[in-house]
Image: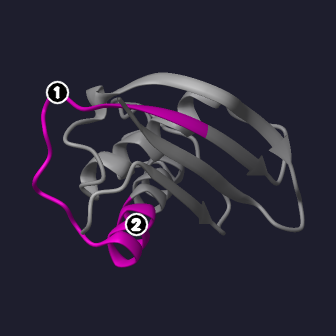
Amino acid sequence: MEERNIIEFTYNNEPVPFERMNKLNMWAGRVQRYLKYKGDLTVALMSHYGRNEKHDKKTRYSLSLQVYRVRDAGDLDNYAKGVIDAIAKAGLVWNDKAIIKYVEPFEMLLDKQNPRIQFKLRKLT
């Protein structure tokens, strides 16, 4: 993957918020649904951008995120968690801790006809 200063991506699937696993909900459908969503998003990112294993560990990033949901449910930080984990697992950043800044727009919206996430990942200089 060539190095990029800005990565913009739209994932046209219904966003799924992060779900903590505990003894009560470990096998609940919500946890399985979240894990599938995060895995599918990771695969989509890797298919689109390839996988970059070579990162300067001093590099930091900012992230803008728009979450278009079918219904008014979930917290923005729980949607962001899955996106950030997928970005890191796909190799777009060296570690999820490299994303140190959230920038506008960082919001949740409703779109029952076209649920999706859109993000912009920018390398900070």
Secondary element type, mark 2: helix
In the rendered image, which residue does mark 2 sit on?
45
From this view, report whether residue 42 is shown above or below residue 96: below
| Residue 64 placement, left or right of 62 | right
Amino acid of disc 2: Leu
Q: Which residues are magenta?
A: 39-64
| Number of the label disc, if any, that sits on residue 58 | 1
Q: Position of residue 104 (x, y in %)?
A: 69, 28
Q: Is residue 116 visible?
A: yes
Q: Say which residue appears at 19% left-offset and 42% top-offset.
A: 94
Closer to us: 29 or 42: 42
For the N terminus, give its image quadrant: bottom left
Give how far across and how far down residue 114 sits, in percent.
82, 67
Residue 48 within the segment the image draws in magenta: yes
Q: Residue at x 45, y 43 (%)?
A: 82
Between the residue at mark 2 and the residue at mark 1, the CA separation in whole angstroms equals 22 Å
Image height check: is 1 above or below 116?
below
